[in-house]
Amino acid sequence: MGRRITMATRDEVLQALSVRYVNASRGEKGRILDEFTAVSGHHRKHAVRLLNRWRSRSEDAPRRGRRVYKQAVREALLAVWEAADRICGKRLRAVLPTFVDSLEHHGHLGLDDELRAQLLAMSASTMDRLLAPAREATAGKRRRRRSTDSSVKRRIPVRTFADWDNPEPGFFEGDFVVHSGGSMAGQPIHTLCVTDIASGWTDGVPLLAREKSLVVAALDALRAQLPMRMLGLDTDNDGAFINETLIDYCVENRLVFTRCRARRKNDQAWIEQKNGAVVRRMTGYARYEGLEAGVILGDLFRVVRLYVNYFQPSFKLREKIREGAKVTKRYFSPATPCDRLLAEPRVDDAVKQHLRDERARLDPVLLIKELRDAQSRLAAWAREAQTGGCATPDAPTVEGFIRDLPKLWQLGEPRATHQRTPRPARTWRTRKDPFEEVWPRVMQWLHDQPNASASDLLPRLEQRHPGKFSNAQLRTLQRRVHSWRRAMATQLLQMYTAPTEDGVSTRGDVTRGRA
C-alpha cells in the first residue's frame, strides 16, 4: 500500500461519500466501502462507523459534551487540592471526604448539599482532568516527545536482538554518538558509527549536523571503504534514520533496512557496545563542534578504522544460558574483525587477499602514534574552545615515540582526550592557624633544641598558655614542625651547593673539611 491520505483529505472524502452512502442500497454501500477503504487504508468496520457517524455531524456546530460539574465545584476542588499539597487525583480521591469535613468544620469551605454531593461523587480521573489547567499553569506543559511519522515506521520492519541468526558479513547496525559535552545546545558534532554483526568490523564518520541527507552521504563514504559489501542496515528510531530519504536510498542500493524496538537498546547491543569501546574510548566526552573539530575527528577515525579492525581483538558471544536468576555467557576466543573475516567461509577470496595485503602493509606502532597525535590535537582544540588561547602541542618524532614507548606507562593516561586537568596545589588554609601567635617562640625552642618533637613542645605551650591548647592540636603542631624541618633542610642544601665567587661549588670544600 502506498502513502496514506491525510486527515483533511479523508474528511473531504467522507463529506462527499456520506450522503451517497446513507441513501444507497446494500450493493451500492458495498461498492462505496470498497472505494473508501482502498483510498484511506482503513479497516472495513472502521469505515462503516465513519460513514454512519459523519451524517449526524454538523460541521458548523460545536461538538456537544456533558458539563456535569459547575464552576463552584471546580473552585471547591481547587481549594481542597491546594490544602492537600497538590497531590494526584487518585490520592486526593482517597482523602477527599476527610478534607471536605475538616475544611467545613474550621470554616474554610462552605458548600450546599448539591455541591457537596457532586464533589464527593467525583472520580479520580475527573479530578485530574479538572485540575489539568491549574497544573499546567504552575508547572508548565509537559514537553511532548517528538516522534517520526507512523506511516514511515510501518514501512520499516522491526528486528530484535533475537532475530540475528548468524548472518553473513555485511549486515550492519548503525547509531549516532553525539559529542555534546553534556549540553545539546547549538550544533554539536555527531559520529555515525556502524558495526558488522558477524565480524565486529567497526567504522565511523563525523557529521557536522544530524540531518538525513548527510546520513546518506556518510553511508556512501562508509560503503566505499568497507572491505565487504553492505547488505543490510539496522538502526534505532531516530528521525534522521526513519525517513523517506533513507528508505529510498536502501531500496535503490538493495540494502535490507530494519529498525529496533523503541527504547529497547538491547536490540542494538552490538553497536551500543562499540559506541563506548571504540568511539568514546578514542574521542572522550568533551564537546566538539564546527568544521575544524570535524576535520580532526575525520583524521582520528581514519586511523581508528585501521587500528581497531586489524589489530584490536574483541570477544564475541557464543551463547547465553539463563537458569533462574543465573545467566551464564560463553564467548569465542578473542579475535580481530580482520581475523574473523579471514576465517569466514562466506567471504570471497578476493576480499580475504585484500585484507591480508592491507594488514601486511600497516605498522601498528605508527598507527598508535598517529592515533595519539590526533587525540592530542582534539584535546587541544577542546581546551581552546573552553578556555581560549591554548596552543596545539608538538607531536613527537617517530624515533622519539618508539624510544619512549616502554616508558609511556610512567606518564599515566596516554590519551589526551581523557586526561584530567591537574588541580592546583593547595596553598591556603580553611581555618585560622592556632599556633600563629606563639610560633616565633616555638621556632626559638627548635633552634635551641633541634631534636625536640611536637609531643615535647605541646606540654610547654599548655603550661605557658593555660586553657588555650589541647592534645587535639598535636597533629597540627606536628605538621608545622615537619614543615619547619623541611625548610631548614632545603636552606642548608642550597647553602652547600651554592657557587662561590670563583664559580666553584662549596660542597666539595665542606665534604673535605668533614673528612
Image (spheres, rainbow, N blue to C red):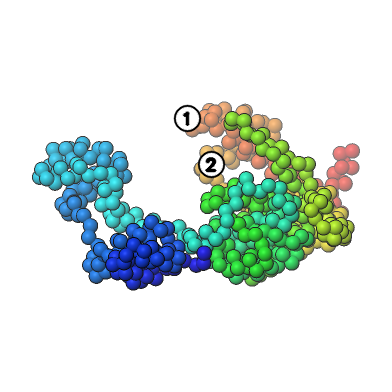
At horizontal 26% and vertical 48% (from top left) the residue drawn is 126
Q: Secondary structure at mark 2?
A: loop
Q: CA distance from mark 2 to mark 1?
A: 16 Å
Q: Camera-side residue: 9 or 319?
A: 9
Quick one: SS at disc 1?
loop
Q: Residue at x 69, y 44 (%)?
A: 487
- Tell me the kind of residue under disc 1: Gly
Numbered disc in front, either 2 or 1:
2
Q: Relative to residue 328, is residue 174 depicted above or below?
A: below
* Rendered image: mark on residue 138: none
Name the spot of residue 179 as percent of width and height, x first.
60, 60
Tag on residue 433?
2
From the top left corner, tell me how far across and down residue 504 is, in percent.
Answer: 87, 54
Residue 60 percent across, percent down from the top left: 24, 70
Name the one closer to the observer, 298 or 174: 174
Q: Identify the residue shown where x is 65% and y is 41%.
A: 483
Height in image: 167 above or below 462?
below
- Which residue is depicted at the point 19% across and 44% down? 119
Q: Name the N-terminal-most of marks 2 and 1.
A: 2
Can residue 109 be spotted in the picture?
no
Q: Nearer the viewer, residue 390 or 62?
A: 62
- Looking at the picture, which amino acid does disc 2 mark? Asp
Q: In this rendering, does residue 158 appear at all?
A: yes
Q: Nearer the viewer, residue 423 or 469?
A: 423
Counting from the top left corner in percent of width and height, residue 368 is at 79, 56
Q: Quadrant of residue 172?
A: bottom right
Relative to residue 483, is residue 101 drawn left or right? left
For the image shown, how many numbered marks are present on the structure?
A: 2
Quadrant in which the C terminus is drawn: top right
The residue under label 1 is 467
